[in-house]
Image (cartoon, coloured by chain):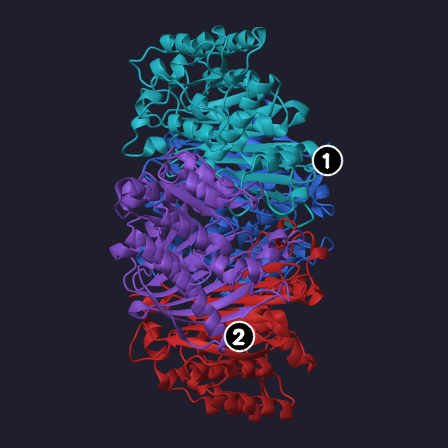
Chain colours: A purple, B red, C blue, D cyan
C-alpha cells in the first residue's frame, strides 16, 4: 500500500475492508511522504498479489503506472489521474499487460446500489427518463476544515477540486446504475469557500444515451451535509431512490401502486437480486455501511486478481470515463456552460 | 368565482380555504364553460369585494383584465397569463386602478416556508451560496392521467406545460424565501410522456443576485412522486430544508452543531418567527396542510382588500416574474441551453 | 355550541371543521363561564339541528344530558363524562329518545386510520397478535404549561388526568381499528410533573377478544413530544403502522415482501378502501391534517343527524367504553396493577 | 472459539469484528456439534488470550465454566446461562480467578448508545421519568423461519424463548443507558407462532431506582420487523430516541427548543461525548453498523484482557442481571402478571 498513513482518511478504511472478509494480508507499505514508493515496488515485485494506491491525487498516475510496469495488479484511489490522457495511458498499460486495474468507487459496492442497477437491468423501471444525482458535503464550511486548503490547491489536487474529488463518484454511480453512457454535458461551477482556489460547487446537466437526461449537483459548501450521496431515477414504469445516509434501504415508487421499501438481505430474497444478496453479510436489520461497501469492491477485485476474469467492480473504464467527466465539466464551465461532448 | 366547477381540482380547495377563517362569503360564480363570465362580472360589479379566477390557463388574462377593469380586486390562479406582456398589462392595470391583484402561489403560504424566509432575512444562514429546488410530480405516468392531454396541449395550456404549471411555484418559492432576484438562467427541457406535446420535464440552472446559484428541477414524469415540492438553501453559516410532504417541519443544519428540527407553532415560539406563528392555527403536533396554506394567502389577500395596504402574499410582481421565468426557460432551451437574461 | 371561547383549544377547531365542508351553520353559542347554557338550550330547542359541547370535563355530563332531554342531537367532547354511570345514562337517554350522540375521537376521522381499519377488516393482516399504541405529549414539561394546573386538578378534570384526557383517544383507536373489544387490563400510573395532582403518565397492558394483546402508553410528561399518536398492529400475515405526525401515510409490512407505504387518496384508489378515499378531499401529496379529520367526524355525524341512520363516527358506545377504560385503569393501578375486567 | 460454524448467524460476525481493528487472531476453534470442545480447551490452555463461546444457549454455562476453570478469559454470548444460579456461578468463578468475563450485548457498543448514556450521566435529560424500550422482530412469521423450531424448544433454548433471546438485550440497554437498577417488574407473555412452544412475545412493566418507570416490549412475531431495537428516555429537561435501524443518529427533544439530531463523529465533537467519538471509526456520513458495534465490545474486552483493568463492556454483572430479568419475567407471567422483585 502506498499512502494511507496516520493522518489519512481512506487508509484505515482500506485496511479494515481488506481484513473484513480475510481476503488478503497487507504485507508491506509506504505510508509517508518520506518513504520511497519506488523502493516499495522493487521490494514487493513478484511477491505480492496487488498494489494499493491511496496517496493524494497528484501522485496517483505515476505510482499506478510504476506498479503496472512492475507487473503488479493495482487498485488506485479516485481520481485515477489528473488528466484523461493519463487515465487512458494506465488503461492501455493494464490491458496490454493483462493486469487488473481497480478504482474503488466505493458507493457502487453497496448492496442496495447493486439492487438498483439490477432492477434497472431487469426492466422494473421501464424506459428511464431522468436521473437526479447529488453528492454534497459541507466540509469546507466547518471551522476546522483542514482538508480545504490542499483540496482547493491545484498543485496537489490537480485542475479540479469538488468534481474530481466527489463529483466522479456521482458520475460513476449514474452510469453504473443506469448502464448508460453520458454523451454530452454542461456545467456551471463556483468557488465559494476560498476565492483563490479551485471550484467547490458544481451544477451539471447531462444528456445520456437512449434520450435520458441527468442532473448532478456536487458541492463542498453544502453546509451541514455530512456525506449526501443521493440517487433518484425516474422511469416510465417506476422510480427508485437511494440515500447513502440510509444505505440499507431502497425505495421504489410506482405510478399506480404503493411505494415499496426494499431492505438489504431481507427474507424476500427472491425479490432482491442475487448480486445484492451476495454483497450482503448480515440479515436485514443488522446494519452494514461504508466499510462493507469497500470490502465488496475488494471481494470482487481480489477475485479478479485470482481468477484473471472480469468481475463486478469499477476499473480502468470507469476511471477513464470519470476523468472525461471532469475535463468536460471544466471545459463547459469555462465556455459559458456550453454543451460539451464527453 | 370564475371556474372551479365540479371537475376542478383547485375550485373546492379555494372554497374551503375561504371558509376556513370565515373571511368572505362566496356569493356568485360561473363554474362551467357554458356560463358567461362577462355576465357574472356585470352582476357582481360594485357588490362584491373581489373576484377569483380559477379557469384553465388560456382565459386567465382576459377574465382577470375584465375584473380589474370592472373595478374589482382580483385573485387569479397561476400562471397569471400566457405571456410576460399580458402579465405586465395586468400589473399595470391593477397599479393604475389601485386594485389588489393576488396570485395564489400556495406554497408561500405555509408557516414553515415563512419561517424559512424569516430565518434567511435574520441572517441565520449567513451568506447564501446555493439553492436546490424541485417540484416534481409523476402524474403523467399514471394510467388514468386525465389532465395530461389538455396540459400538454398548447391551445389550452399556452406555450409551456410543466414550467408554467408547477415550475412557476418552484421559481416563486426560491425568490420568496431568499429575497433575491434571478438574473439569468439556462434550461434543458424534454417531452417524455407524449411526443407531440409541450415539455413535461425541465432542468434549469439559475444565477441570482449576490452571486447565488440555484438549480430547479420540475417534472410531470417523475414516476411515483405525488407532489414533491422540496427546497434546500445552503448558506455560509447554516442550511435549511423544507419538504411539502412533511410541511410542518423545517430542518436547519449547521457546520459545527447538531441539526435542528423546527416545528410549526411549537412551544419555543421565541425561536420561530412571529409571521410563521401568526400563519399557524393549531399547536405543533396537530397537522396543518394545503388548505391552511391557501387560507393563509386568502387571509393576507382579504386583509389587503380591506385595508388597501400591502401584505404578505404573492401578487402582480410575482405573477410577472414567474412569467418571465417561463419565457426565459423556453428561450434558453430553444437556444441550446444558452444563458438567458430574465 | 357550549364552551369553546377565546382561550379554548378545541373551540376554533370545531368551528373550522364545521365550515370546511359547509355542512352546518353555527347559529348560537355560550362561550364563557358567565353565560348560562340552560338559557342557550331553551333558545335553540327545536330550532337547531344539534348541540356541541366543548366545555371542561366536569360539565360535559349535565350539558349533554340537558341537550338530549331538550330533544337535541348532541356532539360532546371526550371524556363524555366523569364516570361510567354518567356515560351510560347519556347513552340510554339518547337511545330512548332516538337522538344522535357523537363523541369526537378525532383520530378515528383520519383517512389512513379508516384505511387501517378497512385493511384489518379485509383480512390483510391475518389474525392479529398484538397492538402497540401510544399517545404521548410533553406539554406538562413546558415552562409555560398553562393547562397543567387544571388538568391535574380533580375538581375540574374529574378522577383522571392523562388517561381521561388523551388515553381515551388511544383506547378508542385500538378498538376502532381492530374491531375487537378489550376484556381486561392492568395499569401502572405515575404523577411526575406535580406531586399533588392526578396521574400524568400511565402504562397499560390489555387483553382483548380473540386472544389479542395490546399495550397503551400515555403521558403528559413525554418531554419534547408534541402530539405523539402512534399505532402499530402486528398480525400473522402483515403489520401496519400509523403516526399522527405523518398522517397521510400508512406503512404496511409483510413477513416475506417489501414494506409498502400507502398514501392518502393516491392514484391506486383500488388498493385503498372506499371509505378512506371518501374521507379525503385532495389528491395525495396535498396534505390534509387535523381539521380535515374532525371535519370527517362532522360529515358523518351531520349525515346521521339528517338521515337518522347509523354512520361511521364514534358515539355513545365509544363514549361509554372509553369511560370504562378510565375506571378500570384507575382501579387496577390502585390494586397493585392487578388484571381488571373492563 | 466454540460454536459459530457454517450455519451460525453470530459466528461470522464475531470473526469480522475481531479482524476489524486487528486486535486478535483466531487461532483455534470447535465449530461443529461433532467436535469436542473439551479437547479444544485443553489444546489452547495457556496458549491463547481468551475463549469465545457462541454455541446454542444450553451449552453456554458448561463451556464458559470449563474455560474459566482452565484459566482462560471468556467472552460468552447471551444468555450467559439458562438460570440465574448458573450465571452467578460463572460470575463468582471469574471473580475468584480474576479472569475477564464478557457478554457481548452488542447494542451497548454503538457509539450513539454510548452518547445516550453519557448525555444521561451529564444530566442533559434532567431527572428521568420514563423509559420506553422495544426489541421486536418478525422472524417467526416468515415462511422459512428455520430458527423458530429450536428457539421455541425448551430442551435447547432453556426456559424462555424471546425474553432470553432478545429481551435481555433490551433490558441491558435500559440499565446501561440510564445507569439505574430495575427493582421490580410485571410481565404478560404469549405464544403465538407455535402453540406448543415457549413464549414468543412479552410486554413488561418495570419500576427502577429513583422512581423511574419503564416498559419493555419484545417479540418474535412482530411481522415485518427486521431488528427493531428502539429506545426512548423521557426526562424532566429533555428526552432522547435511538433506533438501531438508523444507528448513526441520536435524536434529543426539548420542552422549549427545537429537536436536535446528533450524528456519530460529526464535526461538533465537543457536543458529543469522548467515549462515543472514541467508539467511532469514520467521520459522520460514512455509516458504521452492527459489526463495528461488536468490534467496539471486542476493543474494550481485549483491552481488559491486556490490562486486567475494568473497561466499558458488559460482563458478569450484566450477564447475571439479565438472567434475573428473564426469571422474574417468567415468574410474574405465571403469577397473573404480579409485581415481582428482580
Image-based side of B21 in relation to D44, left or right: right
Q: Which mark is residue C259?
A: none
Secondary structure of the residue carrying numbered label 2:
strand
Question: Toward the viewer: C61 or A247?
Answer: A247
Q: Is residue A238 above or below residue C221?
A: below
Image-based side of B215 in relation to B267, left or right: left
Q: Quadrant of the N terminus of chain D?
A: top left
Give the quarter of the image for residue A258: bottom left
Q: Is residue A49 above or below residue A149?
A: above
The residues bearing labels 2 and 1 have C-alpha atoms spaced at a distance of 56 Å
Bin the neighbour count of mark 1 within 10 Å (Cα to Cα): few under 14, some 14-19, many 20 and up.
few
Chain of the residue under label 1: C
Q: Quadrant of the C terminus of chain D?
A: top right
Question: Toward the viewer: A188 or B86?
Answer: A188
Chain of the residue under label 2: B
In the image, what residue occupies the spot 38% across and 40% down?
A: A45
Circle 2 is placed at which residue position?
Answer: B206
Secondary structure of the residue carrying numbered label 1:
loop
Bin the neighbour count of mark 2 within 10 Å (Cα to Cα): few under 14, some 14-19, many 20 and up.
many
| Residue A270: % across, % down | 26, 43
Question: Toward the viewer: B163 or C293?
Answer: B163
Q: Nearer the viewer, mark 2 or mark 1?
A: 2
Residue C173 in view: no
In the image, what residue occupies the spot 45% across and 78% down?
A: B164
In the image, what residue occupies the spot 55% across and 51% down?
A: A226
Q: Are marks 2 and 1 in contact (CB under 8 Å)?
A: no
Circle 1 is placed at which residue position?
Answer: C194
| Residue A166: % across, % down | 49, 57
Q: Is residue C184 above or below residue B302?
A: above
Amino acid at each position: 500500500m502506498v499512502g494511507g498513513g496516520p493522518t489519512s482518511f481512506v487508509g484505515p478504511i482500506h485496511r479494515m475492508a481488506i481484513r473484513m472478509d480475510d481476503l488478503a494480508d497487507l504485507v508491506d507499505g509506504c505510508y509517508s511522504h518520506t518513504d520511497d514508493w519506488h523502493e516499495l515496488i522493487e521490494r514487493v515485485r513478484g511477491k505480492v498479489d496487488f498494489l494499493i494506491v491511496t496517496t493524494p491525487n497528484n501522485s496517483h498516475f505515476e505510482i499506478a503506472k510504476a506498479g503496472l510496469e512492475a507487473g503488479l495488479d493495482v487498485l488506485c484511489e479516485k481520481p485515477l489521474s489528473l488528466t484523461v490522457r493519463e487515465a487512458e495511458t494506465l488503461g492501455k498499460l493494464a490491458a496490454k499487460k493483462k493486469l487488473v486495474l481497480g478504482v474503488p468507487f466505493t458507493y457502487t459496492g453497496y448492496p442496495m446500489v447493486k439492487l438498483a442497477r439490477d432492477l434497472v437491468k431487469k426492466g422494473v423501471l421501464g424506459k428511464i427518463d431522468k436521473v437526479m444525482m447529488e453528492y454534497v458535503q459541507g466540509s469546507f464550511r466547518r471551522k476546522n476544515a483542514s482538508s480545504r486548503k490542499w483540496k482547493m490547491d491545484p498543485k496537489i489536487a490537480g485542475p479540479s477540486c469538488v468534481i474530481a474529488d466527489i463529483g466522479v463518484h456521482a458520475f460513476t454511480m449514474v452510469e453504473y446504475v443506469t448502464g448508460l453512457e453520458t454523451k454530452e454535458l454542461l456545467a456551471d461551477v463556483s468557488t465559494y469557500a476560498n476565492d483563490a482556489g479551485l471550484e467547490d460547487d458544481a451544477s451539471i446537466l447531462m444528456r445520456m444515451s437512449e434520450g435520458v437526461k441527468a442532473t448532478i449537483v456536487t458541492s463542498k459548501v453544502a453546509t451541514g451535509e455530512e456525506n449526501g450521496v443521493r440517487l433518484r431515477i425516474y422511469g416510465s414504469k417506476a422510480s427508485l431512490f437511494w440515500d447513502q445516509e440510509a444505505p440499507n434501504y431502497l425505495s421504489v415508487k410506482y405510478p399506480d401502486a404503493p411505494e415499496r421499501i426494499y431492505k438489504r438481505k431481507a427474507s424476500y430474497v427472491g425479490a432482491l437480486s442475487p448480486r445484492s444478496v451476495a454483497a450482503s453479510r448480515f440479515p436485514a436489520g443488522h446494519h452494514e455501511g461504508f466499510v462493507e461497501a469497500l470490502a465488496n469492491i475488494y471481494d470482487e477485485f481480489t477475485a479478479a486478481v485470482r481468477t484473471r476474469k472480469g468481475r463486478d467492480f469499477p476499473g480502468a473504464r470507469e476511471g477513464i470515463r470519470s476523468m472525461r467527466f471532469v475535463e468536460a465539466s471544466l471545459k463547459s464551465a469555462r465556455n459559458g456552460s456550453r454543451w460539451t461532448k464527453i
